[in-house]
Image (tube, rainbow, N blue to C red):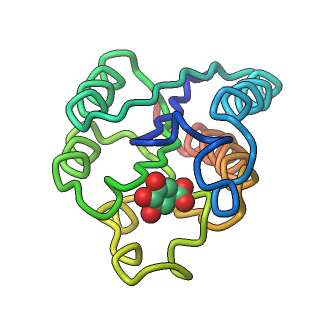
Amino acid sequence: MAAILLLNGPNLNLLGSREPDVYGHTSLEDIQKKLAQLASTAKHELQSFQSNAEHELIERIHQAKKEKIAHIIFNPAAFTHTSIALRDALVAVEIPFIEVHLSNVHAREEFRRQSYFSDISRGVISGFGVLSYELAMTAAIETLKRDKGTSKN
Ligand code: DQA
C-alpha cells in the first residue's frame, strides 16, 4: 500500500461552475471521490489538497516528503505557467509526479504552452477533462508497481 497525493492549484475549487465549456461540469469533490475509489481498489490511499495560494501548495509538497507520499498527481492550474517556486519544491522532495490538465493546454492561448513542470514530471496528461485525472491515477498505480519491482529495498 502506498499514499498518493492529489494536488490541485488555483481556481480548481470552482470546477463545475468555472467555464464549464472548457473545464466541464464535474466538481472537484466528485473528482476526488472518483480518484479515492480508484486508489482504494488498487489498495492505495489517496490524500487530496487544493489551494489558491502558492505558498500553501509548497508547504503541502514539503509535508508530503515527511509523510512518505509515494506519488503526486498535480494540476498546478495557472501556476503551471508561472511558478518556479513550485517546480523547485517538487525537485527538492524528489517525489515522482504526473502533471494533469483538464483542457488541452496546447490548443489554447500561446502562454499556456509553457510549463515549468513537464520536463521534471513522469508524464503529462492534458485535454481529456475529468478523464485526465483518471488516466493519471491509472498511470500512478502502474508506476508504483514498476517502481516497487525495481526497488532495492
Ligand atoms: C488547467 C489549464 C491552465 O492553463 C489553467 O490556468 C487552469 C486549468 C487545466 O486543468 O486545464 O487553471 O490546468
Determine the residue positioned at 24% across, 38% down.
54
Front in this rendered view, residue 117 or 81? 81
Front in this rendered view, residue 67 or 149? 67
Q: Position of residue 37 (x, y in %)?
A: 79, 25
Determine the residue positioned at 83% across, 25% down.
41
23 sits to left or right of 43:
left
Image: 60 above or below 143? above
Query: Residue 99, can we see it?
Result: no
Q: Quadrant of the N terminus?
A: top right
Q: Position of residue 90 (x, y in %)?
A: 29, 44
Residue furthest to the top: 67
Tally of marks: 0
Q: Position of residue 25 (x, y in %)?
A: 75, 46
Image: 17 above or below 60? below
70 sits to left or right of 79:
right
148 sits to left or right of 153:
right
Q: Position of residue 73 (x, y in %)?
A: 53, 42
Image: 11 above or below 80? above
Which image quadrant for residue 36?
A: top right
Determine the residue positioned at 38% across, 83% down.
110
Query: Residue 72, can we see it?
Result: yes
Residue furthest to the right: 41
